Image: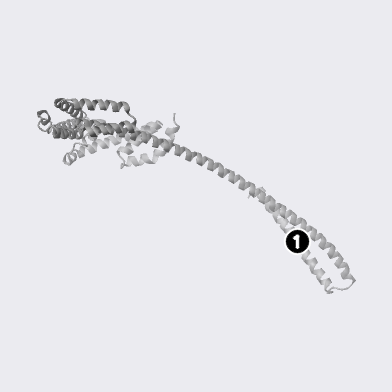
């Protein structure tokens, strides 16, 4: 207990004692007055006692009033002190609420900005998909559909220049000879083969075969996509074997990711052992880099490699250890120059 609290407690006890003594004195005086009024105490001596008690009662009454006044003053002072404390607490609460509102407003603005960025990204993606659909319709001579989609591109995205260009292409293709149309379609399919988009290429081949089933140059496309796909897979497997022999971990990981779309379950099982060794070595490599960056206080680099570990090896023990340190790394990365 502090000295101030001790003083307040002592003062309160003294006031309570005085007030109690005054009440007891008044009660005793009142009892004597009642006894005299009832003629229980008679004689000249008792008259003198009565006068003394009367004077004493008046003094005790005045003392009681004074003590009561002092008590009320102390009580009011404490109430006012409590009010000041309550006002101070309310001010702190309001200040905290203001800070909270500021934080919430900042979060809301960031979320709104994030939503706007997402909207822009999705809008651009939708535009690309729509343009691709228009070009496919033109190649497949679905003229009415292409016209409608060009109008949607112009109205929905305000892409007047792109719409004008596509209308010119559409008109050119409509007026082209059959041979020119076939040559344009084959050229597009070959471009898909070059970038290894074999699913898209096969879909274009099948559409072209439906349009011109008897044309020799179209007939030659049968089976060509699968043939090229197999050749590319063999090339990737050969590069994989070379990477394993040279212990080129980074190259091996990249090749495994590419091979994932080509391997059958049997082929994948055959590569499982060597792939496990490559991934293990890669994880150890990344772990060494992570610890090195932390030791050198390169927080941004450590944060990047840590997130990569979690993304690529989410169930590993190392990923779990990195997760536990991720918050601290993020804080230090934000404050580092």
The reply to whether residue 157 is visible in this rendering is: yes
Where residue 109 appears, as percent x and y from the top left, is 45, 37
Q: Which quadrant holds residue 314?
A: top left
Where residue 307 appears, as percent x and y from the top left, is 35, 36
At 87% from the left edge and 65% from the top edge, which residue is drawn?
Answer: 51
- Coloring scheme used: one colour
Q: Which type of secondary structure does the marked residue at label 1 adopt?
A: helix
Counting other residues with Cα less than 10 Å from the Cα at mark 1, is it few (<14), some (14-19), or many (20 or more)? some
Is residue 92 toward the left or the right of residue 114 in the image?
Answer: right
The reply to whether residue 7 is visible in this rendering is: no
Looking at the picture, tell me which residue is in the foreground, 238 or 214. Answer: 214
The residue carrying mark 1 is: 21
Q: Is residue 300 above or below residue 10?
A: above
Q: Which quadrant holds residue 300?
A: top left
Looking at the picture, tell me which residue is in the foreground, 297 or 79. Answer: 79
Q: Quadrant of the C terminus?
A: top left
User: In the image as oriented, which residue stretches furthest toward the right?
Assistant: 44
Looking at the picture, tell me which residue is in the foreground, 263 or 291. Answer: 263
How many numbered marks, from 0 up? 1
Where residue 272 appears, as percent x and y from the top left, is 20, 39
Q: Is residue 60 above or below residue 322?
A: below
Is residue 302 toward the left or the right of residue 134 in the image?
Answer: right
Where residue 72 appears, as percent x and y from the top left, is 72, 54
At 32% from the left edge and 37% from the top edge, which residue is drawn?
Answer: 309
Q: Which quadrant holds residue 332?
A: top left
Looking at the picture, tell me which residue is in the foreground, 243 or 131. Answer: 131
Q: Is residue 43 above or below residue 93?
A: below
At 15% from the left edge and 31% from the top edge, which residue is drawn?
Answer: 228
Is residue 320 toward the left or the right of residue 68 in the image?
Answer: left
């Amino acid at each position: 207990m502090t000295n101030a609290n001790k003083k307040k407690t002592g003062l309160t006890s003294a006031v309570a004692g005085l007030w109690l003594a005054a009440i007891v004195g008044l009660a005793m005086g009142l009892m004597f007055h009642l006894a005299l009024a009832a003629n229980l105490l008679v004689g000249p001596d008792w008259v003198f006692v009565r006068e003394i008690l009367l004077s004493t009662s008046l003094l005790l009454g005045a003392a009681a009033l004074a003590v009561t006044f002092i008590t009320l003053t102390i009580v009011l002072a404490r109430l006012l002190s409590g009010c000041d404390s309550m006002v101070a607490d309310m001010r702190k609460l309001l200040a905290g609420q203001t800070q909270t509102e500021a934080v919430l407003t900042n979060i809301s603005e960031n979320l709104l900005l994030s939503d706007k960025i997402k909207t822009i990204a999705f809008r651009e993606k939708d535009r690309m998909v729509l343009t691709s659909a228009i070009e496919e319709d033109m190649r497949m001579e679905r003229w009415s559909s292409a016209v409608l989609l060009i109008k949607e591109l112009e109205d929905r995205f305000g892409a007047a220049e792109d719409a004008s260009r596509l209308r010119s292409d559409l008109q050119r293709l409509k007026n082209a000879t059959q041979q020119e149309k076939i040559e344009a379609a084959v050229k597009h399919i070959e471009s898909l083969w070059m970038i290894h988009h074999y699913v898209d290429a096969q879909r274009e081949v099948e559409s072209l075969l439906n349009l011109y089933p008897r044309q020799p140059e179209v007939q030659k496309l049968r089976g060509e996509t699968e043939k090229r796909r197999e050749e590319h897979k063999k090339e990737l497997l050969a590069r994989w074997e070379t990477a394993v022999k040279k212990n080129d971990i980074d190259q091996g990981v990249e090749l495994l990711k590419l091979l994932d779309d080509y391997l059958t379950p049997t082929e994948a099982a055959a590569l499982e052992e060597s792939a496990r060794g490559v991934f293990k070595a890669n994880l150890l490599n990344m772990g060494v880099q992570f610890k090195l960056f932390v030791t050198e206080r390169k927080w941004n680099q450590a944060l990047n490699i840590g997130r990569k570990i979690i993304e690529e090896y989410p169930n590993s023990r190392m990923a779990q250890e990195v997760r536990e340190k991720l918050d601290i790394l993020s804080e230090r990365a934000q404050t580092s120059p």
